[in-house]
Image (spheres, rainbow, N blue to C red):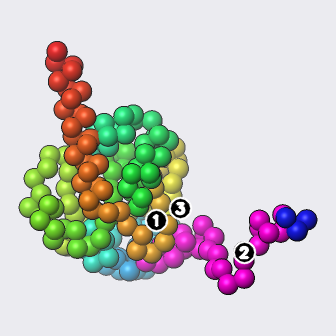
């Protein structure tokens, strides 16, 4: 019995946060990017998506699904999820209707030379005063919704590295171009 208790109970002085605690903290953090918090809460409750302002807490990098699927080597949702979690190690959501993925990165990303004046086809850096429909934390089942978290936030301020996102994009564009060349031959 004591062996089981050791696996379940935290060590003295160790703070444990449940997934629900992290989800709630992430929701409160995201809501601080809403133009109107009450309206955003209502949107999340009714539609599962709320409009948030980019550029204050986070910037979003919008990436074509074709680039993400090429980088992952598959369009299988579970495999893409595993790939993005392993490579980006930060929050990403998908919109199946527009066939785009959104990686959340630090707000300062839009001011980096690699992202300012961005001209990468099928990619857009949404900073400054951009607005974006963001799914409610916990909305992560692709079968139930068109817009969902592929890699959920692990907590407030948990963001992707802009450099890792850029490497993913470059790799996906390279693999997509190689596949197109192979098809032409």
Vertical side of 159 occupied by 63: above or below: above
Q: Which of the two marks, 1 or 2, is nearer to us in this view?
A: 2
Q: In the image, what residue occupies the spot 21% across and 40% down? A: 173
- Report the number of numbered marks: 3
Q: Position of residue 71 (x, y in %)?
A: 32, 40
Stretch in magenta: 4-30
Instruction: Determine whether, in the image, residue 106 is placed left or right of residue 21.
Output: left
Q: Position of residue 166 (x, y in %)?
A: 24, 54
Measure the C-alpha gap from mark 1 to mark 2: 23 Å
Task: Say what secondary structure mark 1 lies in.
Answer: loop
Sort mark 1 into few (<14), some (14-19) or many (20+) by Cα contacts within 10 Å. Answer: many
Instruction: Determine whether, in the image, residue 134 is placed left or right of residue 165.
Output: right
Q: Badges 1 and 2: C-beta atoms under 8 Å apart?
A: no
Q: Earlier in the sequence, mark 1 or mark 2?
A: 2
Sort mark 3 into few (<14), some (14-19) or many (20+) by Cα contacts within 10 Å. Answer: some
In the image, is residue 2 part of the stretch drawn in magenta?
no
Q: Which label is found at residue 10?
A: 2
Q: Which label is found at residue 153?
A: 1
**Where is mark 3, residue-wise?**
138
On the question of residue 130 being in view, the answer is no
């Amino acid at each position: 019995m004591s062996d089981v208790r050791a696996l379940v109970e935290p060590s003295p002085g160790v703070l444990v946060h449940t997934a629900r605690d992290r989800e709630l903290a992430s929701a409160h953090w995201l809501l601080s990017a809403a133009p109107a918090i009450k309206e955003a809460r209502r949107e999340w409750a009714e539609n599962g998506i709320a409009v948030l302002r980019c550029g204050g807490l986070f910037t979003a990098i919008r990436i074509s699904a074709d680039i993400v699927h090429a980088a992952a080597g598959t369009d299988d949702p579970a495999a893409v999820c595993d790939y993005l979690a392993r490579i980006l190690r930060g929050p990403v959501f998908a919109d199946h209707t527009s066939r785009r993925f959104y990686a959340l990165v630090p707000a300062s990303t839009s001011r980096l030379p690699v992202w300012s004046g961005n001209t990468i086809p099928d990619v857009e850096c949404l900073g400054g005063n951009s607005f974006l429909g963001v799914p409610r934390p916990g909305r992560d089942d692709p079968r139930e919704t068109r817009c969902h978290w592929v890699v959920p936030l692990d907590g407030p301020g948990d963001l992707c590295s802009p450099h890792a996102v850029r490497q993913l994009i470059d790799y996906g564009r390279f693999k997509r171009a190689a596949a197109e060349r192979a098809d032409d031959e």
